[in-house]
Amino acid sequence: MAVPAPPPHPLDRPIWNALCGRQAGLASGDRLARRYRADISPFAASRDDSPEALAALAALLSADRDAVALEAGTIAVPPGAVVEKQALGVQMVAGTLPAPVADDRVIALGDADAAEMLALATLTEPGPFLANTHLFGGFIGVRIDGRLAAMTGERLKPDGFTEVSGVCTHPDFRGRGLAGLLSTIVAHRIAARGETPFLHAYASNGGAIRLYESLGFRIRTEVSVMVLRRADQDAGDSFSNRPPLPSSNT
């Protein structure tokens, strides 16, 4: 008698599971494919790799806005789509976190800080970060001499999990441990809600991976990342205007 295959892990398709759960209110699409609001994130996903789901994902691609796909294993390219960029990443899940550290420099970030958050993310490229990405919530930061020196927040939220993301430090303030400090605080807040913190980094970014391992994260799986666009988009549109691939900036 054949043993039934175990159900897929919710983090194998984290975008899809987030958009079908707690973040459904940020989604457009249907039961086959979904993507985030254009002002929040370029992430998009299909339910599975069936022809009907991939066709539904293709229908969500537009001529003026690219989509970023991220999942474990190989990503199936929707019909009529062009792969602009692709990379291999790792997905890391928190185990035993270090003890939280109190630091009175850490402040909550919100709407009033949105412009500075976008400017810092644009400079450091921690992954796709748009005008309202901060609405994912949970963002904290450190200001030094009035300048936003570093920040970290939350992003994908499949049921039972929340991603630590937007980890970035201004070049003028690196080497002070701010990325580790803020990531630890965000991870502890996630864990305090009874959820498991997770995050993503480029597989080639050994420095980021070592940092997160020192904070109690362990590699769960490799993930594929793709930036997709509709094949009929203007070929003259520069890659410089595309969203950066998801990564972790230390």
Image (spheres, grey):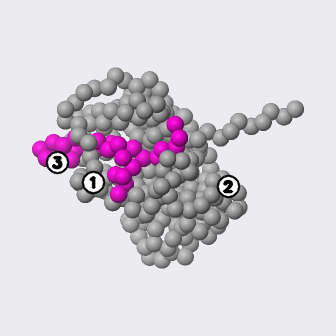
In the picture, measured across the screen, residue 50 lies left or right of residue 245, that is right
**Would residue 148 be counted in the magenta stretch?**
yes
Tally the marks. Answer: 3
Quadrant of the image for the C terminus? top left
Please tell me which residue is depicted at 44% across the width and 41% down the height of the picture.
163
Q: Residues within 10 Å of mark 1 (few under 14, many from 20)?
A: few
Q: Amino acid at mark 2?
A: Asp
Badge 3 marks a residue whose secondary structure is strand
- Toward the viewer: 204 or 47? 47
Q: Amino acid at mark 1?
A: Asp
Q: Which residues are magenta?
A: 132-160
Asked whether residue 70 appears in the rendered view, the answer is no
How far apart are the alpha carbons under marks 1 and 3?
Answer: 16 Å
The image's mark for residue 238 is: none
Where in the figure is residue 19, as x and y percent of width and height?
53, 52
Residue at mark 2: 49
For marks 1 and 3, give the one nearer the viewer.
1
Q: Is the C-beta separation of discs 1 and 3 under 8 Å? A: no
235 vs 86: above or below: below
Residue at mark 1: 111
Q: Residue furthest right?
A: 1
Answer with mark 3 or mark 2, whichever residue precedes in sequence. 2
Badge 1 marks a residue whose secondary structure is helix
For marks 2 and 1, give the one nearer the viewer.
1
Please tell me which residue is depicted at 69% across the width and 62% down the height of the picture.
52
- Toward the viewer: 66 or 160? 160
Asked whether residue 79 appears in the rendered view, the answer is yes
Q: Amino acid at mark 3?
A: Arg
Residue at mark 3: 147
Where in the figure is residue 126, as x and y percent of width and height?
36, 49
